[in-house]
Image: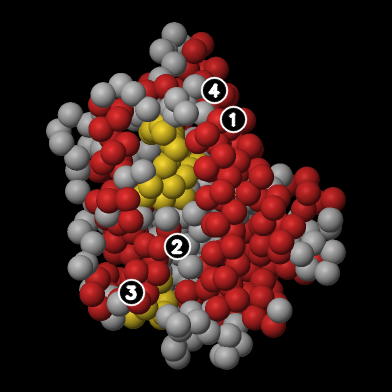
């Protein structure tokens, strides 16, 4: 008989599984190297979902039970223990901290470390696994709440406000204007949670609503004094092992990923880019960079071996064998899957939904050293403008 935790796990995975199935029917980049010693940013605030979450969600604590992220082999490659990151090691936001030579990684907001005065000097990570762009009430009103994470990107903005109030109460100087704001990818969960209601809530509506919420969120940061922001787009969600496992075999694109799912992410990113362009015109005194996750991911998928990957589709920490090594009922960290592949650095996919540290490192290199091909304006340009004290 399934345990309560297992039942919750299946409920959380079910929307994404349905999303994939229904959608189907309707020069190696260097590692993220540090900039010159005098990094202009000493504080970073991060937001997003599980691709950015560094510990706000646990297996059985936090917003809701969300899989087995607190169990091994999560974190095995770098931390040698689980830190509640959905990978075997560091995420892109961690490589950002290293690139900026921050004294530590960003503490998750819901952890005790985030309230530590010295830890606050480097910033805070507000990202939550399972978070959506659209507010939770929308899903609840449409009977789509299941057992999903109730936090949205606007919830994270509320947490940021609370953080600022707490800092002010301790006499700390407001560093909003000097900080770098990292808005990790957000929106993939919105499409997944609404797939069972596609007849009344089509993907086009979700795209419009999700991008509008992200735009409102970014503008909220600007109104609070943010001057330097990097906003990520969605990756190739159709190249994740889970998508590959569940989609129809004929639903493939030119990199052998799920065409319909990748097209959905592409359309979302185009709309987000247009929204960011309007924000730049409205706020010329700020730098709003776009981190093109889709392009970075696509570059790797077009030539995996060039980046050291021999397994572009198989899950490193999974079960079931076959082409994708992914079983919806026996996922990473569960009692049935407490070990991972011997060489995670050869794999792009970690647990079927998230990526390996090696892949995140390549993506980080694209963002931070790839010029304006993957981050526009370029990361180096953003650093230079901050160093000069001008947007």
Contact, CB < 8 Å: mark 2 with mark 4?
Answer: no
Q: Residue at x 67, y 56 (%)?
A: 207
Decide which of tag 4 and tag 3 comes sooner along the chain: 4
In the rendered structure, which disc, 1 or 2, sits on the residue that comes first in sequence? 1
Could you say where residue 307 lies in the image, as x and y percent from the top left? 24, 71
Say the numbered circle drawn on residue 294: 2
Callout 4–callout 1 Cβ contact below 8 Å: yes
Residue 40 in picture, x, y percent from top left: 26, 28
Question: What residue did someone put label 1 on?
Answer: 220
The numbered mark, 2 or 3, whose residue comes first in the sequence reads 2
Ranked by sequence position, the earlier of labels 2 and 4 is 4
Name the residue tied to disc 3.
347
**Residues marked 2 and 3 touching at CB (< 8 Å):** no
Residue drawn 63% across and 37% down? 216
Give the alpha-carbon distance from disc 2 to disc 4, as whole Å.
29 Å
Residue furthest top in the image:
171
Up-down: is 309 above or below 15?
below
Q: Could you say which disc has been placed on residue 224 in the image?
A: 4
Would you say 131 lies left or right of 293 here?
right
Above-or-below relation of 120 to 344: above
Distance of label 1 from label 2 (alpha carbons)? 25 Å
Q: What residue do we see at 26% from left, 41% from top?
A: 380
């Amino acid at each position: 008989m399934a345990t309560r935790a297992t039942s919750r796990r299946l409920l959380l995975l079910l929307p994404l599984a349905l999303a994939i199935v229904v959608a189907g029917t309707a020069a190696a980049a260097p590692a993220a190297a540090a900039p010159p010693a005098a990094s202009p940013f000493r504080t970073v605030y991060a937001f997003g979902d599980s691709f950015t979450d560094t510990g706000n969600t646990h297996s059985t604590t936090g917003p809701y039970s969300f899989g087995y992220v607190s169990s091994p082999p999560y974190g095995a490659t770098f931390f040698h223990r689980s830190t509640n990151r959905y990978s075997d090691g560091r995420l892109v936001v961690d490589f950002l901290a290293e690139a900026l030579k921050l004294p530590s990684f960003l503490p998750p907001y819901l952890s005790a470390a985030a309230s530590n005065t010295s830890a606050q000097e480097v910033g805070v990570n507000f990202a939550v696994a399972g978070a959506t762009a659209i507010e939770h009430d929308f899903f609840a009103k449409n009977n789509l709440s299941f057992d999903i994470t109730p936090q949205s990107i606007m919830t994270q903005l509320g947490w940021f406000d609370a953080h600022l109030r707490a800092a002010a109460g301790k006499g700390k100087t407001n560093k909003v204007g000097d900080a770098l704001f990292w808005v990790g990818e957000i929106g993939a969960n919105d499409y997944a949670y609404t797939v069972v209601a596609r007849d009344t809530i089509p993907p086009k509506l979700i795209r419009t609503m999700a991008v509008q919420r992200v735009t409102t969120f970014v503008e909220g940061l600007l109104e609070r004094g943010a001057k330097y922001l990097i906003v990520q787009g969605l990756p190739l969600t159709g190249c994740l092992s889970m998508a590959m496992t569940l989609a129809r075999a004929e639903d493939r694109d030119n990199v052998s990923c799920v065409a319909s799912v990748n097209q959905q992410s592409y359309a979302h990113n185009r709309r987000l880019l247009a929204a960011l362009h309007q924000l730049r015109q409205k706020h010329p005194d700020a730098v709003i960079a776009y981190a093109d996750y889709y392009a970075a991911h696509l570059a790797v998928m077009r030539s995996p071996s060039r980046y050291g990957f021999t397994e572009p589709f198989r899950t490193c920490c999974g079960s079931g064998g076959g082409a994708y090594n992914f079983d919806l009922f026996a996922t990473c960290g569960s009692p049935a899957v407490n070990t991972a592949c011997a060489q995670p650095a050869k794999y792009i996919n970690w647990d079927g939904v998230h990526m390996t540290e090696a892949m995140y490192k390549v993506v980080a290199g694209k963002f931070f050293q790839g010029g304006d091909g993957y981050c526009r304006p370029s990361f180096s340009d953003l650093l230079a403008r901050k160093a000069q004290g001008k947007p």
